[in-house]
């Protein structure tokens, strides 16, 4: 039974890993009149560049458009050149002729559409618009001061889903910006005239993503938008033997470091490169990497310009994966000998030392634990402990059954503090219900406890209102990012905490799932495929 369970779990993990390599690329395109100056020169080229440079076999491309209302245009899974041609032909049929721009309806439609896609694919979303919300008569989102709240709520849901969103803003035309503007027959004053103000900065702030501004007169390629790592292939290598060196260039366009794990280079002549290597790139770094490639023994003397394809073993890809390798093969040229990497021996030595140290620590912990149990069992009537039917000591607080304590409408919440030990039983796991706030603070806090840094005993509290869990700061100085405002729907959102001494940490509130329930949910993936609906 145990062996069968292990095989089943390993199968599920393997299947999820394979599926997770696939990517859903979703483009939301503004086709209103205000986009006309940029349409053919920039948008056509940009989308075409993404399709040709950053789509691979097995990926799916989705195109959604919006002006007066959002529309589905096309969805194709890339298998051959035929699918790419169908996508490009569909894009050519689109024209920016819409008189209105219902941005919030489009954003809502984008979320609902993406949420319906397969769970185990990476979601990469590209939004192309000038950011204006100018809805038509009868829109469910008329011009209102609540527009900002509506767009933020949708953006928060996207962030919670972990989707990768790129925001591209085109300049607002001068004739769109006036002191007052009539929409739906109502003239709005500057204080509520949100329809002529781009809403993308508010979306970007919620998603913690930059807004990439496009100037129609300047060229831009897909890497400037998606910030994906780029591969520059070598020029003509010249005369080579059976094995030779080839210099590739990797460019990190993002402001975060990336680690690429290259596993192989394939060609019609067979696998040219079989030794995995890692390429680590700092923020916006360009790095040259020299690889030793080996040709087939059957190759004949002559000039070659062969197609090659690079393979990576995780979800972080570099583009374009396909390129050309130009060289002249001469069997008289000596092959490149493999160089010995002396650092491998150093890594092995360090690994052995660390393993010995870990074994030594575990042995001492085991001895200490054994001695403590023997000493405890010798004492009669030990205080603070209860004996179960087998005589095992356990504290009622640490092992209490939280699930049995919950009532209808209540949930269990766990507070996780950065760098703070979570192995404190159920000290930071509590049940919350409607209109019953739970305190958050340092020593003396009745409920959620922060002990890694010094704070007041009630610097904030967690509340549930109509099923929504929110965090309310009570001491504004400890939560500078919140500025005294309530954080609605706060689950899974990190909250920065700074004490009076300037020491910083962060707290995150997650719904607590018991270990038994987690195992049951994992096993139910056999009934319904997809990622578990909880955080580990």
Image (tube, rainbow, N blue to C red):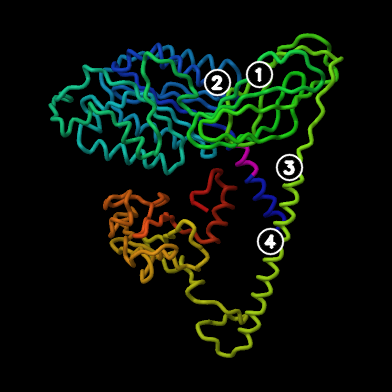
Disc nearest the viewer among 2 and 1: 1
Residues in magenta, as a range: 14-19
Q: How many marks?
A: 4
Q: Are marks 4 and 2 in contact (CB under 8 Å)?
A: no
Which of 171 and 350 lies nearest the eye of the viewer? 350
Q: Earlier in the sequence, mark 2 or mark 1?
A: 2
Taking the magenta stretch, the answer to whether it contains residue 123 is: no
Q: Which residue is mark 4?
A: 358
Q: Which mark is residue 343?
A: 3
**Rendered position, 488 above or below 243:** below
Disc nearest the viewer among 4 and 2: 4
Q: From mark 3 to mark 2, how far is it between C-alphas?
A: 36 Å
Quadrant of the rendered image containing residue 449: bottom left
Q: Earlier in the sequence, mark 4 or mark 2?
A: 2
Which of 356 and 404 lies nearest the eye of the viewer? 356
Q: Are marks 2 and 1 in contact (CB under 8 Å)?
A: no
Q: Which residue is mark 2?
A: 53
Give the residue drawn at x 38%, y 24%.
128
Q: Residue furthest top?
A: 302
Q: From mark 3 to mark 1, how far is it between C-alphas?
A: 27 Å
Q: Earlier in the sequence, mark 3 or mark 1?
A: 1
Q: Are marks 3 and 2 in contact (CB under 8 Å)?
A: no
Q: Are marks 3 and 1 in contact (CB under 8 Å)?
A: no
Quadrant of the rendered image containing residue 110: top left
Q: Secondary structure at mark 4?
A: helix
Q: Which residue is mark 1?
A: 234
Mark 3, Cα crowd under 10 Å, few <14 / some 14-19 / many 20+, is: few
Q: From mark 4 to mark 3, how far is it between C-alphas?
A: 22 Å
Which of 294 and 134 lies nearest the eye of the viewer? 294
Residue 507 spot, x, y in % from top left: 41, 56
Mark 1, Cα crowd under 10 Å, few <14 / some 14-19 / many 20+, is: some
């Amino acid at each position: 039974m145990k062996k069968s369970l292990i095989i089943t779990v390993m199968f599920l993990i393997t299947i999820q890993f394979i599926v997770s390599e696939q990517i859903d690329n979703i483009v939301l395109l503004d086709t209103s009149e205000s986009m006309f100056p940029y349409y053919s020169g920039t948008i056509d080229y940009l989308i075409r560049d993404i399709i040709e440079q950053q789509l691979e076999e097995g990926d799916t491309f989705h195109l959604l458009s919006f002006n007066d209302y959002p529309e589905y245009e096309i969805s194709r899974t890339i298998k051959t050149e035929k699918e790419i041609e169908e996508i490009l032909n569909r894009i050519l049929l689109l024209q920016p002729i819409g008189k209105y721009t219902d941005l919030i309806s489009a954003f809502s439609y984008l979320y609902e559409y993406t949420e319906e896609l397969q769970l185990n694919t990476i979601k990469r979303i590209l939004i192309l618009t000038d950011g204006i919300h100018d809805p038509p008569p009868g829109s469910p989102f008329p011009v209102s001061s609540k527009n900002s709240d509506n767009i933020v709520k949708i953006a928060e849901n996207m962030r919670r889903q972990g989707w990768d969103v790129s925001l591209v803003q085109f300049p607002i035309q001068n004739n769109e910006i006036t002191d007052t503007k009539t929409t739906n027959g109502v003239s709005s004053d500057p204080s509520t005239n949100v329809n002529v103000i781009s809403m993308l900065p508010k979306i970007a702030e919620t998603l913690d993503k930059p807004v990439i501004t496009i100037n129609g007169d300047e060229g831009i390629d897909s890497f400037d938008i998606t910030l994906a790592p780029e591969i520059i292939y070598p020029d003509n290598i010249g005369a080579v033997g059976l094995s030779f060196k080839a210099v590739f260039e990797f460019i990190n366009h993002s402001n975060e470091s990336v680690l690429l794990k290259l596993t192989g280079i394939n060609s019609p002549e067979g696998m040219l490169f079989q030794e995995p290597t890692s390429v680590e790139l700092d923020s916006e770094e360009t790095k040259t990497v020299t690889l030793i490639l080996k040709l087939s023994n059957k190759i004949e003397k002559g000039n070659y310009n062969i197609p090659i394809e690079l393979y990576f073993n995780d979800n972080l890809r570099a583009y374009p994966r396909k390129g050309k390798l130009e060289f002249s093969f001469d069997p008289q040229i000596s092959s490149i000998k493999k160089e010995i990497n002396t650092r491998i021996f150093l890594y092995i030595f360090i690994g052995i030392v660390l393993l010995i140290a870990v074994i030594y620590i575990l042995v001492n912990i085991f001895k200490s634990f054994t001695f403590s149990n023997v000493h405890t069992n010798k004492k009669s009537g030990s205080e603070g402990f209860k004996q179960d039917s087998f005589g095992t000591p356990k504290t009622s607080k640490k092992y209490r059954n939280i699930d049995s304590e919950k009532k209808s409408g209540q949930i269990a919440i766990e507070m996780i503090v950065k760098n703070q030990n979570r192995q404190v039983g159920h000290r930071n796991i509590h049940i919350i219900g409607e209109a019953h706030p739970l305190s958050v603070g340092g020593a003396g806090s009745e409920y959620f406890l922060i002990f890694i840094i010094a704070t007041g005993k009630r610097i904030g509290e967690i509340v549930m209102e109509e099923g929504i869990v929110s965090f309310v700061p009570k001491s504004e100085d400890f939560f500078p990012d919140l500025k005294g405002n309530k954080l609605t729907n706060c689950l899974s959102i990190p909250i920065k905490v700074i004490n009076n001494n300037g020491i910083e940490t962060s707290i995150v509130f997650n719904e607590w799932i018991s270990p038994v329930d987690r195992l049951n949910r994992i096993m139910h993936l056999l009934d319904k495929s997809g990622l578990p609906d909880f955080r580990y």
